[in-house]
Amino acid sequence: MTQSASKPAPQTFHVKSFGCQMNVYDGERMTELLSARGMTPAAEGADADLVVLNTCHIREKAAEKVYSDIGRLRREDGSRPMIAVAGCVAQAEGPEITRRTKSVDIVVGPQAYHRLPGLIDDVMAGRDAVDTDMPADSKFDVLPGRARRSGTSAFLTVQEGCDKFCTYCVVPYTRGAEVSRPWRAILDEARALVDGGAREITLLGQNVNAWTGEDDKGRLQGLDGLIRALDALPDLARIRYTTSHPNDMTQGLIDAHAEVGKLMPYLHLPVQAGSDRILKAMNRSHTRESYLRVIERVRSARPDIALSGDFIVGFPGETESEFEETLSILRESAYAAAFSFKYSPRPGTPAADMADQIAAEVMDERLQRLQAEIINHQIAFNQASVGKRTTILLERKGRQPGQLVGKSPWLQSVHVEAGDARIGELIEVDLVSAGPNSLGGVIVSRQAA
Ligand code: 5AD
Ligand code: SF4
């Protein structure tokens, strides 16, 4: 990409993140980085001098979205903002993006976004601005400190990348090898988030339960050690983590669910499929049985834990009876929530070249059947909560005036008539009604139980 003319310095910016929670976190860090450069955030992309599209490459539909979004940024007078494509599409497609559309100025991968200010300078000087390096120096060492004000519930990346190489998945290519951030950097960032107002922290990683590092005394710790250290932060009320791989559920982490009061009773543990033949073809490196045994151990440590999972339907070669094994593992696992996707062949992954790709109509039909089951489970789980007294963390306004929405320990959204209660408070509620995606609650006390 060679720019013919230099451009004026952008004063305002807008970051739009798609896809997973780690992209939301990266988007926040980019916002802090650009603010530290003296730029001002704009509420809408249309008003900004620079728009950063922080993209997702996990499925084709998500990846294609970026191109329609780029088109939409053209203004009525024919002008457009400076456009940066960041995130996993940037990593996977690199310079191809600027070949496909002339409207992109910057391409920056998920491990290189700390270099965004320099890339803006490159555009202004008329130089190429494509950076999809996976540099040895960590972006975390360069990014400015966390903003002074955090939301009630904050994300904190502790681990990034994946060495598992499931045959359908682009993550090991777009996010790179598994890297754990150092203990001290994580605890300092957690403290800054709590000082900024966060009551809940969700530790993020593509394989978050593979996190490992040395504590301040040089002792080797796993994610459970990190959770126990966070438990000691007085103003932090809740700890969560996502996403976990079944093979990395250590006994220490399972025990933490029984012993650490701030660790919420929720576990996102994707299984993807219920048939051993498909799991093997996916290179999941666990079986149906070994997965079920892990959740049995988790449930015996924390009987009220809410489990959630991810499922892929229509993996190459999946037969009707293999799909039925997915339905049956869903029933056996009794998930509180689950996310299901049609298999999407991703360029460069082994499964994309496998024989027996499944017809679109078959995938549609299987997805519908799976989702119908999932909704039944969600409704059953939510209905079983009605009548319970619990604590919710108030996070946002509801649609009705006077209403606030909080999260239960099991990650359910709970709507309440707020009265004097405020966002950021933990309040005691009675759960009184349930739908597939949320619950109704009545405040018992503004003091958390
Ligand atoms: N096709 C469909 N779903 C996928 N996922 C990952 N890769 C693909 C793909 N190629 C799903 C998995 C994963 C979730 C984040 O996205 O279920 O757990
Ligand atoms: Fe992708 Fe598998 Fe790694 Fe999860 S464990 S990020 S599905 S390769």
Image (cartoon, rainbow, N blue to C red):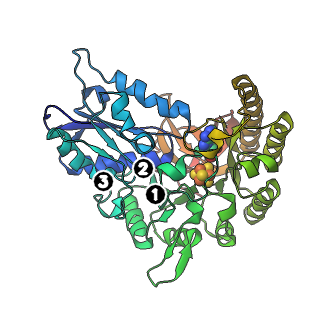
Per the image, label 3 sits on a secondary structure element best described as helix
Disc sitting over residue 157 in the figure: 1
**Which percent across, then down, holds residue 302?**
72, 62
What amino acid is found at the position of numbered circle 3 in the picture?
A: His
Q: Residue furthest top?
A: 76
What amino acid is found at the position of numbered circle 2 in the picture?
A: Tyr
Q: Mark 3 and 1 residues: CB-CB less than 8 Å, in contact?
A: no
Mark 3 → mark 1, Cα distance in angstroms: 15 Å
Q: Mark 2 and 3 residues: CB-CB less than 8 Å, in contact?
A: no
Per the image, label 2 sits on a secondary structure element best described as helix
Q: Which residue is mark 2?
A: 25
**Which percent across, then down, holds residue 308?**
68, 48
Q: Relative to residue 167, is residue 209 depicted above or below?
A: below
Task: Report the side of 175 relative to 314 (left or right).
Answer: left
Q: Which residue is mark 3?
A: 114
Q: Mark 1 and 2 residues: CB-CB less than 8 Å, in contact?
A: yes
